[in-house]
Image: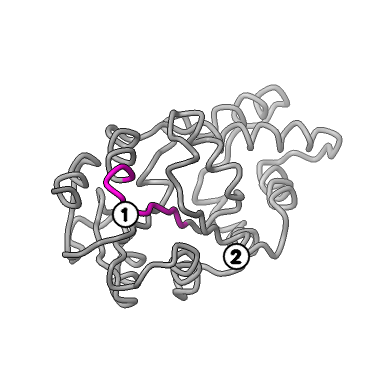
Amino acid sequence: MTISAILFDTDGVLYHRPRADRHLASFLEQHGLTLRHHKVLDRALRAARFDVRLGRITREMFYDAVLRVHGLEDETLFPVGRDMLVQDAADIELFPGVRETLEALYESGLKLAAIADSAHPARDITGWLAGQGVSLGLWATFAISCEVGQLKSDGALFDAAIDKMGADRDQVAYVGHTSDELARAAELGLTDVAFMPDDPAVETMYTVSSFYGLQDLFLD
């Protein structure tokens, strides 16, 4: 296996959010409201979530919709509510071994990039990671759907990242956790690596249960 560049999914691979919605929940409680179930939000906001990830609407517009679904009616409170949602988005925790492994991969000469269907711009996500000790200098590029205007599902976001890195597709690996995105990467000719996949039965070229496993896979 000859790999010169690695694409990483972000949420669910580099980091997770074990304290999800805590700022929003506190804010809502102050105003006599409670968090709606995530399934309610998914149904109510499906179209808006699609649009914000493509950059068709702003993150602020999407957050206003989130607040309305939770029952907030006083629009003078929306700026504070949006700030709570931003704080929750930034409240990430790295998976064990992420920082050390990224540094080792970078020092070996591999190009590293991140790719995400997200409403959050690259400057925010790289800032969150930097706050967890992941240096900005490790990244060759970030390809984020809301900035590129393309999703991973149609392959264009993968192409955008690969083009920016100047890598040959057959020398690029994709580390993800969502089965359909891993399958899409394989269809595009990338080496697909599943990290704690959402479907344990997903068929990929490689599977790792620990981020440290990427060092065994890619480093001599």
Toward the viewer: 65 or 173? Answer: 173
Q: Name the amino acid, label 2.
A: Val
Q: Are marks 1 and 2 in contact (CB under 8 Å)?
A: no
Give the residue at the far right of this rendering: 76
Q: Quadrant of residue 85?
A: top right
Residue 147 in the image: x percent, y percent?
Answer: 63, 60
In this picture, is 64 found above or below 24?
Answer: below
> Residue drawn 47% across and 33% down?
92
The colour scheme applied to this rendered structure is: one colour
Residue 99 in the image: x percent, y percent?
Answer: 35, 34
Using the image, tell me which numbered label, if any, was put on residue 148.
Answer: 2
Q: Name the amino acid, label 1.
A: His
> Residue drawn 44% across and 29% down?
133
> Residue drawn 74% across and 52% down?
61
Residue 131 in the image: x percent, y percent?
Answer: 51, 29
Q: Quadrant of residue 203?
A: bottom left
What residue did someone put label 1 on?
A: 177
Left-right relation of 162 to 42: left
Residue count near mark 2 (Cα–Cα under 10 Å), binned few <14, some 14–19, many ≥20: some
Q: Does dot 1 land on a helix, a strand or a loop?
A: loop
Q: Does dot 2 land on a helix, a strand or a loop?
A: helix
Sooner in the amino-acid sequence: mark 1 or mark 2? 2
Residue 202 in the image: x percent, y percent?
Answer: 21, 63
Distance (Cα) linking label 1 and label 2 = 22 Å
Q: What range is drawn magenta here?
A: 106-115
In magenta segment, residue 138: no
In this picture, is 77 found above or below 148?
Answer: above
Toward the viewer: 161 or 200? Answer: 161
